[in-house]
Image (cartoon, rainbow, N blue to C red):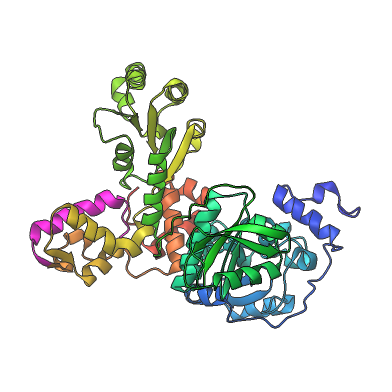
Amino acid sequence: MSADMPEDDLPVDPDIRQSWYRSTLAGLTPGSQIAIEPATMNLQSRLVRAATPILQGLENQLHGSNFGVLLADNEGFILHRTFGTPKLAAASDRLGVVVGAQFTEQTSGTNAVSTPIETRRSVFVLGEQHFLECLRDQICFGLPIFHPGTRRLEGVINIMGSSRESPALMKPVLTTAVWEIQQRLLNTYSDAQVALLLAFRATCDRHRRMPVVAVEPNETFTNGAAAMELQSSDFTVLREFAARPGLDSGDRVLVDLSIGQQAVLVERVSEQGAVFRIMRDEEGTEAVPRASVRHRTLGDELADAVARARASTGHVLVRGEPGSGRTSTARELAGGDVDLVIDGRDAIVMGPKAWAVKLRQLAERPVDGFVVESVDLLDARLLGVLYDVMEWTSSRMILTCDPDTDAIARVAALCRSVIELPTLRQRRSELPVILTKLLAARGAKDVRFATTAVATLAGQDWPGNLKELQVVVDEALASRSAGDITVADLPDRYRTPVRKRNLGLLEQAEFDTIRKVLTQVRGNKVQAAQLLGISRSTLYSRMRALGLQSISY
């Protein structure tokens, strides 16, 4: 670090500290001004097209607030900005935070645009943590945006506010926005490009060290090995090969590349698209199975996680809120035998000694697997017993717990697979599909939920998750056995949304964050305010505005 910067003045956070070091190496000092050379940007890029609807939603929610949002590409060029007030926009103009300006650690030091690009991780930069003094009246949170298919860094989204604002609620806002942008990035591809991408990913997953290239007329995907070894001229050669009509999956061809003549294994994806695997030895020529093309949801990701856990060996941890399907998922993985279950809640009734004996008895039985429910409710002594049993048993153990697993971190470390169950609040867009499946499971072939009923249910908070929804479906079926289930057929308490109005993206993230913290502290407002980093009066005000004061915890 530079000689004019005493050790005591350096940030404690290691990521921020390293960023300051890189900024110093670039020749910056805290008194430097931001080096701005606005460039002409492609404002019709794939990232901009994918992010625009999300940014518009954020703009509506930020109106009148003390926050602003920036979108930058993977080189730090600002592509879009929006601020809650004209005053904030004017202040940003004076700093040079304008569309076309480039923010890197070499030009602007440590901030929530440049540092996430450098580290490939989300970064909080709070006031004095900014390297440049001119930025130290701001708090910022930046989150990198990766393409969900190629996993390439596409850009950064950053939310900023004055140092008087609490950063505690920033993270969920951007996390939700980034997830939506990443899904839309995938949707910008044509069907042929998506098919190529999925085949490319499947090949890379099977052959992690082998150079893999996927090409079609307007897109090229490469893994790390191919990017290091090949040149752009090689991709042109492979693109020409992909367009040849006689090239089929499983063919092995000799191709003249910049690294010499190479044997290349082909997987044909479309008429002009193919995946090429550059062979290092005489391994088999089987073709990579082709993946189907469809929009992936949280439900799809959950199904994949369960399938991977089922196919693997070792203990499994199923983590999720009450009612999210922990028990059914765990018992499905254990084979569905209801006798092979022990619940952490039973330790209170049985006593620690009897509970430990039953656990050991289950672990000694010659079974493929058994379930231990609610391990987060066990005390430290029984967690130690559970840890010991997990180490010596030959049976597979499927554990369930609440989302926060800090208390059982030692036990969780022994689990080879971890399944995160999404909440029903996170799956609101999937509600029509979920309701259809619930009706089918109950044999209700002639019944469906009307659009208005689905919209009303989507406005509920669902603290009980899927289990609560199942109860609602059963009550609705009790009043209608055929035709459309309308709002009038829903239980009385579900005929109007929990909130007085629909929440936007920013407010929804704030609602979910405050509700989660209040649940963790069992409704203790003092503790909740401390964890959120806001005053109690601010917490009460936000609870009233979001309709949280009427919810019990």
Q: Nearer the viewer, residue 474 or 277?
A: 277
**At which x and y percent is residue 496?**
24, 66
Q: Which residue is drawn at 69% across and 75% down?
A: 97
**Does residue 139 sit above or below 33 in this rendering?**
above
**At which x and y percent is residue 73?**
64, 71
Q: Residue at x 60, y 58 (%)?
A: 264
Residue 467 within the segment the image draws in magenta = yes
**Does residue 525 sit above or below 275 in this rendering?**
above
Res 126 visible: no
Q: Nearer the viewer, residue 94 or 154?
A: 154
Res 72 visible: yes
**At which x and y percent is residue 518?**
42, 49
Q: Which residue is drawn at 39% across and 30% down?
A: 397
Q: Which of 500 and 369 is in front in this view?
A: 369
**At which x and y percent is residue 353?**
36, 16
In the image, which residues are magenta?
460-483
Q: Nearer the viewer, residue 241 or 154?
A: 241
Q: Which residue lies furthest to the right in this view?
A: 3
**Does residue 550 sit above or below 102 in this rendering?**
above
Residue 21 falls in which quadrant of the image?
bottom right
